Image (cartoon, rainbow, N blue to C red):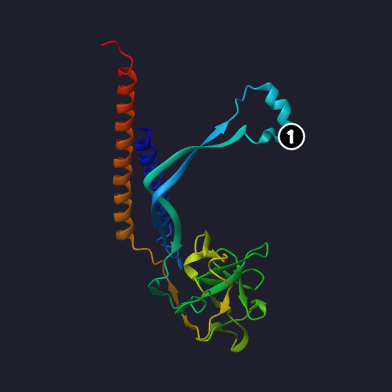
């Protein structure tokens, strides 16, 4: 009887995560260079279930025994319950590699990558990230930065254009200040870019699954345009509706199982 409740609850958790992914995609539909995440569900013929057990918070003897460890909120451990068949779980989310459309801005510091690859940027703490967004600008120190202030990395580190009157970026990534080349943009690729971790907006971080960054051979830079988000709003709305309906159906199944359990408890042992 309770396995039906576990199965329905498992399905509700999956759809909740699906809605989180869809909501994040829709929130970044207008973020330049953003690439949508896709939730990957997997079904298993049999999955082990367990329950989390906790100590009572009023057990003063336990508090004394735990001492400095009592910050672990009275966690006793996990106890196996059994197995559940035909369970669907959210396995992972991966990044869509489909390119977004290019919007022409005629701004010389707006660039897009024609093909695969990612620009390299650094935040104020020296952390390295990767992005498809080429919405660059000059900060107060005369450095080339993203719209949120991350430093654009060139072949020699951060790119400084100073007080140059004119800035241009060539199709090979060369950065020109007043007609003189001062740097070249770093453009990197990954063996499995779908496994890059999203850390906010269009910023991505390498993972063990994505592989280490490698220079993008022959990457072509398009100046005067921005790659828009590849989120397809209509498709995401369809996914949201499907996830909502699946969540409601799963919640209804849990309610029915709970009602049946209640009837069983009240019926067993009742004098005939």
With respect to residue 228, does 6 lie above or below?
A: above
- Please tell me how crowded label 1 is: few (under 14), some (14-19), or many (20+) other residues with Cα within 10 Å: few
- Residue 153 at x, y percent in the picture: 62, 75
Q: Nearer the viewer, residue 80 or 11?
A: 80
Q: Which residue is mark 1?
A: 68
Residue 219 in the figure: left or right of residue 126: left
Secondary structure under tag 1 reads helix
User: Quick one: 252 or 44, which is closer to the camera?
Assistant: 44
Q: Residue at the far left: name it.
A: 272
Residue drawn at 74 percent across, 34 percent down: 68
Q: Position of residue 259 (x, y in %)?
A: 31, 27
Is residue 88 shown left or right of residue 61?
left
Asked whether 100 or 206 is in front, the reply is 206
Quadrant of the frame with the N terminus: top left
Above or below residue 204? Residue 27 is: above
Q: Position of residue 97 (x, y in %)?
A: 42, 70
Pick the quarter of the image with the C terminus. Answer: top left
Question: Which residue is painted at 64% across and 68% down in the image?
Answer: 140
Residue 22 in the image: above or below residue 142: above
The residue lying at 39 percent from left, 38 percent from top is: 6
């Amino acid at each position: 009887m309770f396995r039906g409740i576990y199965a329905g609850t498992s399905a509700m958790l999956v759809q909740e995560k699906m809605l989180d992914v869809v909501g994040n995609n829709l929130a970044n539909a207008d973020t330049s260079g953003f690439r949508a995440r896709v939730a990957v569900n997997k079904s298993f013929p049999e999955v082990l279930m367990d329950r989390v057990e906790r100590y009572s918070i009023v057990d003063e003897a336990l508090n004394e025994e735990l001492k400095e460890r009592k910050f672990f909120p009275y966690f006793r451990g996990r106890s196996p319950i059994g197995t559940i068949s035909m369970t669907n779980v959210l396995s992972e989310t991966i990044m869509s590699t489909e390119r977004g459309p290019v919007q022409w801005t005629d701004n010389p510091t707006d660039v897009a990558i024609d093909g695969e690859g990612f620009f390299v940027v650094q935040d104020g703490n020296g952390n390295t990230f990767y992005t498809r967004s080429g919405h660059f600008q000059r900060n107060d120190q005369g450095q080339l930065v993203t719209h949120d202030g991350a430093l654009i990395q060139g072949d020699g580190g951060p790119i400084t254009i100073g007080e140059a009157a004119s800035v241009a970026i060539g199709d090979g990534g060369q950065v020109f200040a007043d007609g003189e080349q001062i740097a070249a943009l770093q453009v990197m690729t990954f063996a499995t870019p779908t496994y890059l971790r999203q850390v906010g907006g269009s910023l991505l971080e390498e993972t063990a699954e994505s592989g280490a960054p490698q220079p993008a051979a022959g990457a072509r830079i398009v100046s005067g345009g921005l790659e828009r988000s590849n989120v397809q709003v209509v498709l995401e709305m369809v996914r949201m509706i499907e996830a909502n309906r699946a969540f409601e159906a799963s919640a209804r199944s849990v309610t029915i199982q709970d009602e049946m359990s209640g009837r069983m408890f009240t019926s067993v042992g009742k004098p005939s």
